[in-house]
Image: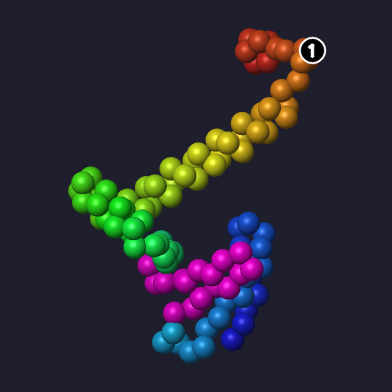
Amino acid sequence: MRVPTRNWLGGDFFLMRLCKSVTPILYSTEYRMSIAPTKNPRINVTFEAVTAGLLAHLAHQEHKSLASLVKELTLKALEIREDFYLSKMAEKLDQKDVKTYSHGEVWK
């Protein structure tokens, strides 16, 4: 059964469910995500053997599970991308010879 839905990013998804015993899967042009009966969605990632070994070694050193280390590194990478994007936006808005306002003037 295909049920069209919308995601929070505005993309179209199609919910696929063949029978009641099969976990539904969302298909999108951007990515595929399983809807598991858990609080947080699961995402499968495949690494090369060298990268997986390095991640496992780091997780062991930091006394964390591999999944929590990968989650932490992913969130940090998203923060860095967000900072980069916002700084590019600020550079576009930053112009010379523009009237500026002090904090006190703005909040009068």
In the depicted view, which residue is nearer to us: 18 or 75? 75
Answer above or below: position of 24 versus 68. Answer: below
The x, y position of residue 46, in whole percent, is 41, 65
Image quarter of residue 50: bottom left
Answer above or below: position of 29 versus 17. Answer: above
Residue 19 appears anywhere in the view: yes
Image quarter of residue 36: bottom left
Q: Amino acid at mark 1?
A: Asp
107 vs 26, left or right, is right
Kindly identify which residue carries mark 1. Answer: 97
Task: State which quarter of the image contains the N terminus.
Answer: bottom right
43 vs 26, left or right, is left
Q: Residue at x 30, y 53 (%)?
A: 54
The x, y position of residue 11, in whole percent, is 66, 63
**Residue found farthest to the bottom:** 19
The x, y position of residue 90, in whole percent, is 66, 28
Q: Residue at x 21, y 46 (%)?
A: 61
The x, y position of residue 19, in whole percent, is 48, 89
> For the magenta stretch, what is the residue range?
23-39
